[in-house]
Image (cartoon, rainbow, N blue to C red):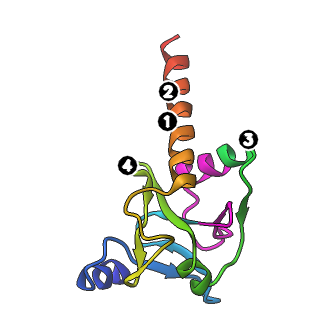
Amino acid sequence: MLACLQAEAAGADEGLMLDPHGFVNTTNACNFFIVRRGEVWTSTGDYCMNGITRRKVLELCRRHGIPAFEKNYSLQEALSADEAFLTGTFGAQTPVHSIDGIVLGDGTPGAGPMTQRIQSLYRALIEEEVAKQRG
């Protein structure tokens, strides 16, 4: 709750949380991913809620040949990422434009190419699952 209040006071939508060892972990409400050199990284999951959308994104990456890693990484690695996005039930994959005022990637607002690809794969998966349920 404190992270949420601090993020709001700073004018941010989410507060990026570090684990007890100082590695990037999650936000106050969503799972956090970065993209670096064509690879998708997220935390090990040891100190965050391992959400369904997080799991689905990792599965989709692996199924479609996108290198995806659950690993420890530093705040500096997140700040120098090409892209970043959040995952959650309501936001699916929400692009992150900046962290602590530092603009990520080339600074273009909106989703970067990898985030867009993952969003597209995720939409297709949802449509497929809905079609199966309808028979």
The residue that label 4 is drawn on is 90
Q: Which mark is residue 127?
A: 2
The residue that label 1 is drawn on is 123
Question: As shown in the figure, which amino acid type bears the numbered disc 3?
Answer: Arg
23 lies left or right of 102: right
Residue found at x 66% / y 79%? 73
Residue found at x 57% / y 78%? 78
Q: Are marks 1 and 2 in contact (CB under 8 Å)?
A: yes
Residue 134 shown in magenta = no
Residue found at x 70% / y 65%? 70
Q: Position of residue 94 (x, y in %)?
A: 42, 56
Q: CA distance from mark 1 to mark 3?
A: 15 Å
Q: CA distance from mark 2 to mark 3?
A: 17 Å
Disc 3 or disc 4, which is closer to the eye? 3
Q: Which mark is residue 92?
A: none
Question: As shown in the figure, which amino acid type bears the numbered disc 4?
Answer: Phe
Q: Earlier in the sequence, mark 4 or mark 2?
A: 4
Q: CA distance from mark 1 to mark 4?
A: 13 Å
The residue that label 3 is drawn on is 63
Question: As shown in the figure, which amino acid type bears the numbered disc 2?
Answer: Glu
Q: Which secondary structure, mark 3?
A: helix
Q: Earlier in the sequence, mark 3 or mark 4?
A: 3
- For the residue pair 134 and 102, the one nearer the viewer reads as 102
